[in-house]
Image (tube, grey):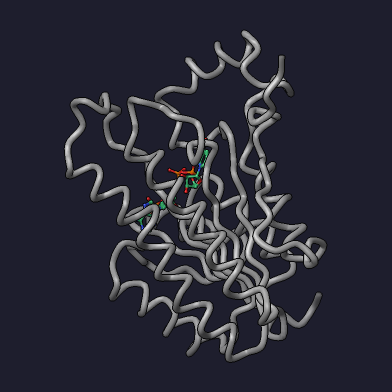
């Protein structure tokens, strides 16, 4: 596509690093992309240089920041075709569920659940005005796999999975397709501290496909959604996990 200004608009939260960056890079081939960051402006600026994406600072857990992000997108680009709720965080420190405190719980619920829940509310209202759109929630296998050393992460992702189902049901009659994309173990900064331990478990057979995921594995699934290939699906859960979710006997 040559005329960039006539391209559809995609908003990717947490586009500065990891999975969100790979999604922003992929979508920038066909869309005008707004990519958000929270603290790593340097990473966001390199994305801007590399792809021409527009970057915007937004702490997704802040109501004011979410409203400012949507206002900015409306004023700058005038339309919204795809929202990718990707931004998220792991606990700063893994702690047993019998010891972990409320501070980490509140931070994760704010960033991983409340933020995308209410950003989607704003985006969905706008999409309804426009007559359609697509919304992706990046959740996690932690939505159903219990990790007792990061219970607050699991709870936030289980809640986000229900948020995806709720918005899918509410918006399907109005031409807005909602999807849950559920990554497994993906090689990013988020898992850097435990990557070696995961590699050992993968070598021992944890994943049927026998390899850790890459951010691009997730980006390709979002590409299929962005292209409308899954438009007769409502609320579909897409496991991007090398087969982790399969139960075998
Ligand atoms: N990596 C995995 O194995 C894995 C597996 C399943 C699901 N996921 C999910 O995939 C998503 C992306 O994870 P990742 O592995 O790519 O993580 P990452 O490399 O740590 O990147 C996280 C991204 O989210 C942004 N972010 C973090 N907290 C934010 C907040 N409060 N407000 C706005 N932006 C915020 C960061 O911005 P800055 O760069 O400015 O810090 C960064 O762009 C997350 O929702 C995560 O839970 C990851």
Query: Residue 17, position in %: x, y?
Result: 49, 48
The residue positioned 66% from the left and 75% from the top of the image is 176
From the viewer's perspective, is 56 left or right of 133?
A: left
Rendered image quadrant of residue 132: bottom right
On the question of residue 32 being in view, the answer is no
Q: Reply above or below: 26 against 89.
A: below
Image position, residue 70 (x, y; %): 44, 80
Nearest to the observer: residue 57 or residue 68: 68
Residue 55 visible somewhere in the drawing: yes
- Where in the figure is residue 116, as x and y percent of width and height? 43, 62
Quadrant in which residue 60 is drawn: bottom left
Q: Nearer the viewer, residue 80 or 24?
A: 80
Q: Where does the image place residue 136, in percent across and percent down from the top left? A: 60, 61
Q: Is residue 53 above or below residue 204?
A: below
Which residue is rendered at x = 41% and y = 76% of the image? 69
Q: Quadrant of the C terminus?
A: top right
In the rendered image, the vertical position of residue 153 relative to residue 86, given as above or below: above
Residue ranking furthest to the top: 204
Horizontal placement of 149 versus 221: left or right? left
- Quick one: 96 or 45, which is closer to the camera? 96
Which residue corresponds to the image point at 56% horizontal and 89% vertical from the top-left? 78
């Amino acid at each position: 596509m040559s005329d960039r200004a006539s391209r559809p608009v995609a908003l990717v939260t947490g586009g500065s690093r990891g999975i969100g960056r790979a999604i922003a890079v992929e979508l920038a081939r066909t869309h005008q992309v707004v990519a958000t960051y929270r603290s790593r402006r340097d990473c966001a600026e390199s994305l801007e240089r590399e792809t021409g994406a527009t970057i915007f600072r937004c702490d997704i857990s802040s109501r004011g920041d979410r409203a400012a992000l949507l206002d900015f997108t409306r004023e700058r680009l005038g339309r919204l075709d795809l929202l990718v709720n990707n931004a998220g965080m792991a606990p700063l420190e893994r702690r047993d569920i019998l010891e972990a405190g409320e501070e980490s719980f509140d931070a994760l619920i704010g960033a991983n659940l409340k933020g995308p829940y209410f950003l989607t509310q704003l985006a969905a209202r706008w999409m309804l005005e426009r007559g359609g759109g697509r919304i992706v929630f990046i959740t996690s296998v932690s939505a159903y796999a219990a990790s007792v050393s990061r219970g607050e992460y699991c709870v936030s992702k289980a809640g986000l999975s229900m948020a995806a189902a709720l918005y899918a049901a509410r918006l399907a009659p109005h031409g807005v397709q909602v999807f849950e994309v559920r990554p497994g173990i993906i090689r990013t900064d988020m898992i850097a501290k435990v990557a070696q331990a995961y590699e050992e478990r993968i070598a021992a057979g944890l994943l049927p496909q026998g390899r850790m995921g890459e951010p691009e594995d997730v980006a390709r699934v979002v590409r299929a959604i962005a292209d409308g290939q899954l438009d007769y699906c409502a609320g579909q859960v897409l496991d991007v996990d090398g087969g982790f979710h399969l139960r075998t006997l």
